Amino acid sequence: MPDTIEKLGNSLIQHGPRNERIYLMKVSGQDLPDIIQDMERLANEHGYTKAFVKAPLQVKGLFRQEGYVEEARIPGFYYGTEDGVFLGKYFDAERSMDPHADKVQEILELARDKAAHDEITSPPEKVQFYEAAPDDAEAMTEVYKAVFDSYPFPIDDADYIRQTMQSHIRYFCGEHDGRIVALSSAEIDRQRGNVEMTDFATLPDYRGRGIARQLLTQMEQAMAEEPVQVFYTIARALSAGMNITFAQHGYEYGGTLVNNTNICGRIESMNVWCKDAAAN
């Protein structure tokens, strides 16, 4: 059962037992500062071990006074002019400590080194890339189910994919011999001028061939049609391939969200990477 996405006042939150957290996805100024205590009450009521906030830099001080710490930052996240910050508060000391912190650091160093020195691999010529349509939704869920044991959003639900296609997410496919073998999506916030490059999934037999990098190229080119100033991603900190992909595409590391997301069957830390769309 996926976590619930709902309004808290005029703000948008996600919360539930899968991620064991409450996530303030979009904060309304009308709800500040009261929403901070509202979130804490909700977290205590359900026994969540983390509160996670995505918000403009200008309101960081309100959260910091209540024990939140900055875990990542994206320059120009709002309208291309104001930084966005990712803030965390832990209600369980164990969740604030990543037992894989040394490995996370090794992968970051590897990604930077690959970006500086490695040639970018080209995908097989027979892989075709295109933007997904509603008719692709059922086949897309099969890929997502094959790749992820768990995921923070219901991308294994064809209705969810079709619904979000109609609203704010553009999905992209890599196809080989008539079969979808890789996927990604661009979750667009047209009001605030940013887009999350996310939901990357490649079937095991097709990994290591540069397909994710080509999908990212396709996505960035498509975003020229959208009113966005910033590209970003929240990637699994333990996925060397995805961190390398974004580093090689000119994304800058913005910080690590510790033990943040239930993905691939467990709660993992996530790395934030970002890029000025004008640099594309």
Image (spheres, grey):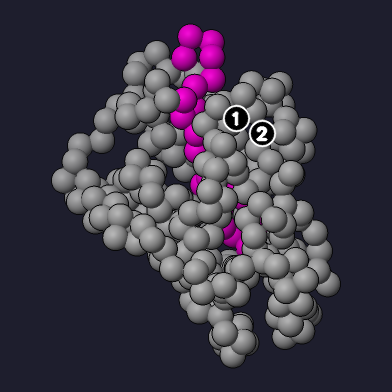
Crowd rating for badge 2 (residues with CA inside 10 Å; few <14, some 14–19, many 20+): many
Looking at the picture, tell me which residue is in the foreground, 203 or 150: 150
Looking at the image, which residue is at 62% across and 24% down?
Answer: 142
Residue at the location (40% across, 20% down)?
205
The label number, if any, that marks residue 156 in the structure image: 2
Taking the magenta stretch, the answer to whether it contains residue 135 is no
Magenta region, mostly helix, strand or loop? strand
161 shown above or below 51: above
| In-image side of 175 versus 192 (left or right) | left
Residue placed furthest toward the bottom: 65
Distance Cα–Cα, label 2 vs label 1: 6 Å
Three-letter amino acid code at the position of disc 2: Asp
Seen in the picture, residue 197 relative to 147 is either above or below; the reply is below
Q: In the figure, 35 relative to 131: above or below?
A: below
Q: Give the residue drawn at x 39%, y 23%.
A: 206
Q: Position of residue 124 (x, y in %)?
A: 34, 18
Residue 103 at what x, y percent from top left? Answer: 30, 55
Check disc 1 and report the residue beneath it. 145
Q: Position of residue 96 (x, y in %)?
A: 48, 70
- The type of residue carrying mark 1 is Lys
| Label 2 or label 1, whichever comes before in sequence order | 1
Q: Do the residues bearing badges 2 and 1 touch, measured as CB atoms within 8 Å?
A: yes
> Left of 177 or right of it: where is 28?
right
Residue extent of the magenta highlight: 176-203
* Viewer can see residue 139: yes
Asked if residue 190 lies in the magenta stretch, the reply is yes
**Residue 109 at x, y = what percent?**
24, 56
Closer-to-camera residue (103/239): 103
Residue furthest top as drawn: 177
